[in-house]
Image: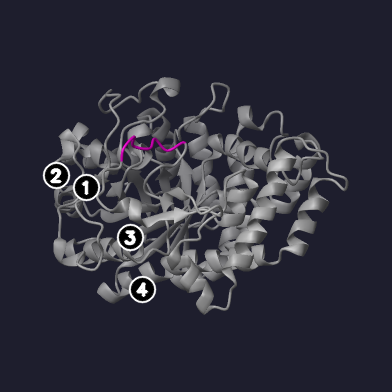
Amino acid sequence: METRGDKFVGIQISPISFIDEDVAPLLDMLKERFGINVLLIGTISWLGLKVGRRISWQLDGWPDHGARDPRPLKGGSYIAEHPEYYGNTFIKHVRAQDEELRDVDILALVIPEARRRGMQVYPEVMEPLFHYEGHGSANVVAIPNLPQTLEIDVFNRVGSAPCINHPDYRTWWHSIIEDYCRSYDINGVMWCNERRSPLDVLLSGGVPHCFCEHCRQLAARRGIDVERVQRAFRDAYGYVEAVRSGAELLDGALVEFLRVLYYNPEILVWERFWVERDKDLDRELYGIVKWCNPALKFGLNVWNRNHLNPLRKAQWPWAEMTRWCDWVKPITYQHQAGGVYVNEMTQWHRSILRDVTPQAMTPLMYRFLGLDEAPWDEVVQRGFDPDTYVYGQCLSTVRAVNGKVDVYMGIGVDAPRTHKDQARCTPEIVRRSVLATYRAGGKGVVFSPNYAGMNLSTLDGAAAALAELGLLE
């Protein structure tokens, strides 16, 4: 197994862990026991999975370190306010108000100690920031004016997420990234884009978006007739309602869906318009990082749905993404992945795949997606196998990026479970995942999704693999 001298062994970590366990001893342990030399710190979020303690403690118990405190964090920005960067957006005053972190600038606190130990530091940020199922969302997001940025759905109702095309929301993201790059001695930024597209939302039983004045204006400048798009999506939503309710369809669910697309081509026009605007946000943030300091790295933390959903996989090819990043981190949370896959495909089997059983379709879907995992009735309990899943995803990503950027695999370590019978993570799963990464040509690993939710005993499996590879200092 070939390794490189420019070691990249990272861990995603929330601000609360530095308060619970104290910066210096925590960094010493991470470096010495687990060989970690890159810290990816959650700096702004209203999601417990990014900035809080273990969100699945009721199901998984508490980890073998840190505070056992079930209070959810309120969320917000965990750095000092630098108002000079936010003059062009009305989204302001987002400093976190959690008792333990109210006056703490987490980057200012951690960076000096990290530098003394030769560790790299990246702010770790993800869009969406707020209400996100399965990520421990805050109950209240008390940001003045934020409701003015919310999406408008196909029925002209106000939605629950900010529109990516709202100028103040988009400029706010520009401001956040510039703030990090100019205010702190960081090595770069890790960005994660996990927003669902209109067609993705539709196939999951949701209401398509966004038809706010800003989206309308942008689309109109591209020659798109927005009124026709809305009518098309309303037809498509009617189809989804019917098929999910069990209505009889003369030609079957899939053929009827293709017929909807045939008579409503505006759906695909709008889908392409929206997805490209979503990708533009990635490209804009990459450019801001490079403008501020060309030496800083822009890493992409890439959603596992991009390889578990055919629509996402088609829309987000790796080769294209290499044009706006310095490295990629495919998310492969192996023990959790069976449950994620079942959740994903259950929505499709309620709509366009209603006429075929999941048991019959799964081998074909695996073939379409390049997977080779357990059967449908066993995959939640067994999870995905590191030697097929992590290895396979790493190998295909390495081939797709073709040497243009490095691949650092996102290794799941005690990622939160959602079902009692769901596979548990073990030290051996983590050990095999690390070895599979380097065997497939990956150049590094990032232990994910959050140190506060990991057991040290599970992370020991990572240490064992790194020792085998000669990467444990």
Mark 1 or mark 3, which is nearer the start of the sequence?
A: 1
Crowding near pointer 1: few (<14 within 10 Å), some, many (20+)? Answer: many
Mark 4 or mark 3, which is nearer the start of the sequence?
A: 3
Instruction: Indicate the position of residue 260 as horizontal and vertical percent values.
Output: 75, 57
Residue at x-position 23% and y-position 55% = 118
- Tell me where residue 4 sits by quadrant: bottom left
Mark 1 or mark 2, which is nearer the start of the sequence?
A: 1
Whether residues under marks 2 and 1 lie with C-beta atoms below 8 angstroms apart, the answer is yes
- Tell me where residue 82 sits by quadrant: bottom left
The segment highlighted magenta reads 134-140
Q: Main secondary structure of the magenta part?
A: loop
Whether residues under marks 3 and 2 lie with C-beta atoms below 8 angstroms apart, the answer is no
Determine the secondary structure under disc 4: helix
Mark 2 or mark 3, which is nearer the start of the sequence?
A: 2
Q: CA distance from mark 3 to mark 2?
A: 20 Å
Q: CA distance from mark 1 to mark 4?
A: 24 Å
Q: CA distance from mark 2 to mark 1?
A: 7 Å
The residue under label 4 is: 287
The residue under label 1 is: 78
Magenta run includes residue 137: yes
The residue under label 3 is: 189
* Amino acid type of the residue that numbered disc 1 sits on in the rendered structure: Tyr
> Closest to the observer: 195 or 33?
195
The residue under label 2 is: 104
- Against 31, is 6 above or below? below
Left or right of 314 on screen, residue 129: left
Crowding near pointer 3: few (<14 within 10 Å), some, many (20+)? Answer: many
Crowding near pointer 4: few (<14 within 10 Å), some, many (20+)? Answer: some
Q: CA distance from mark 3 to mark 1?
A: 15 Å
Mark 4 or mark 1, which is nearer the start of the sequence?
A: 1
